[in-house]
Amino acid sequence: MTRYVVLVLIVAFAMPVAGVACLWDYDTLEMERQQFPELAELISGKFLRHSTAFYEWRIADRQKRIRETPGDVSLYDDLAVAYDKTGHHEKAIETILKVQDLKPDRYETLANLGTFHIHSGDFEAGLEFIGRAIEINPQAHFGREVYQRLLVEYVLQQRGDGPLPQPMSDDDAAFGPRGFATFVLEKQTGSKSSSGDEIERAIKGVSGMLHFGHHDSPVLLEALADLLMAKSGGEHRHLATRAWLKASYSVQDKAIAAEYRKRADQTLSMQTPGIGQHHRFELDEYEKRFKAEVAAADAWFDGIRENESRWIAAGKDADEEFRKTYYETPAAQNDDRSEQSTLRWVVTVGRFELPIVLIAVILIVWLRNARTRKSTGGESLEK
């Protein structure tokens, strides 16, 4: 009987450590979801956005409406953004300039002009318009334009007279601010020392750019990773690892992709999950989980794309259908969270309850064995 007790003890004390190590990545991501509810989904691509077909429909729709009500500037905003989203940046600029003629120095117009120029590659002109928009309304969009301007300035600094290096910074400091985070702190606070409030504002600003701009932009993903690395607490680095990996998927150059993946590996190596031990996930294993998240996000977005194509083919108002489907009755983009939360609860309970149950079993076996030996005059049943 003794050998069975020893075996149960080994299992009982081995399981909690293995469970924590395997679940650290997932539990940490759940904690991040509580602090930054959209970041995990933003990085994977699982958030409400439109397909190219939708923006092409909107171009035709807004052109028609502008002919009917040429004084409605919001229609020009919609048309210009739709052009920008489909890669027609010059048409976007040309369209929004008509609003500038109708209503000079309007905040929305200047902000759009700045963004369109940046997307077209004219950073200097973009900075000028973004700066004018900030003067009019510095707190709009949670101050997103402030960090958009800082990021453009950072890109220009890192680019110098040549092409933009990727990654933009060779700063791979294990602790403290690095890259874009250092640049933000120096510009905003005059110090390289990490400021939690400033970093959080910058994260919100860059998140907004990812959400409403190009969610797979390697420049934005690198900036986000730098900011997350500046946060105190190693748990933020799990999201940073995902940002680096997503950046590696968003470039064609294999050498650049390898550099981003190297940053992901370095970031992951700083994690220390486990009870009384230091454990590091191998990047390949970690990446399998993240790729599964990305694949799920792609499949989820395919549903949006299919809906929009169906509405357009049926001659429906795609704006109205989208509003009714995803705004009035939000889609099930977070259904998996409730399932994952349930699973996390079950696993967490199991992680703490199972050892207790096993210990109880050991005690029962020991007591029963003791009673048996007593009733047989001390002879062991194993003899």
Image: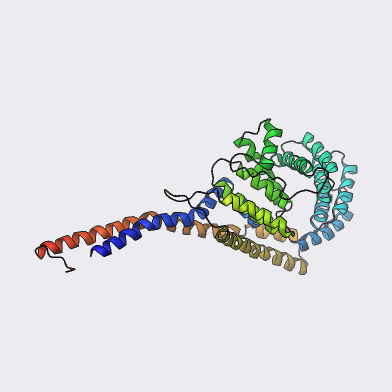
x%, y% of residue 129?
83, 40
The extreme top residue here reads: 190
Depicted 37 relative to depicted 287: above or below: above
x%, y% of residue 24?
49, 53
Residue 2 appears left or right of 328: left
Residue 139 appears left or right of 363: right
x%, y% of residue 205?
69, 43
- Which residue is painted at 68% across and 54% down in the image? 259
Nearer to us in this view, 332 or 174: 174
- Which residue is painted at 75% across and 49% down in the image? 165
Label tally: 0
The answer to whether residue 38 of the structure is visible from this angle is no
Nearer to us in this view, 3 or 102: 3
The N terminus, quarter of image: bottom left
Residue 137, quarter of picture = top right
- Which residue is painted at 85% across and 46% down in the image? 122
Residue 87 appears left or right of 196: right
x%, y% of residue 335?
56, 59
Nearer to us in this view, 116 or 108: 116
The C terminus, quarter of image: bottom left
- Which residue is painted at 27% across and 57% down in the image? 360
Depicted 38 relative to depicted 365: above or below: above
The answer to whether residue 225 of the structure is visible from this angle is yes
How has the structure been colored for display? rainbow
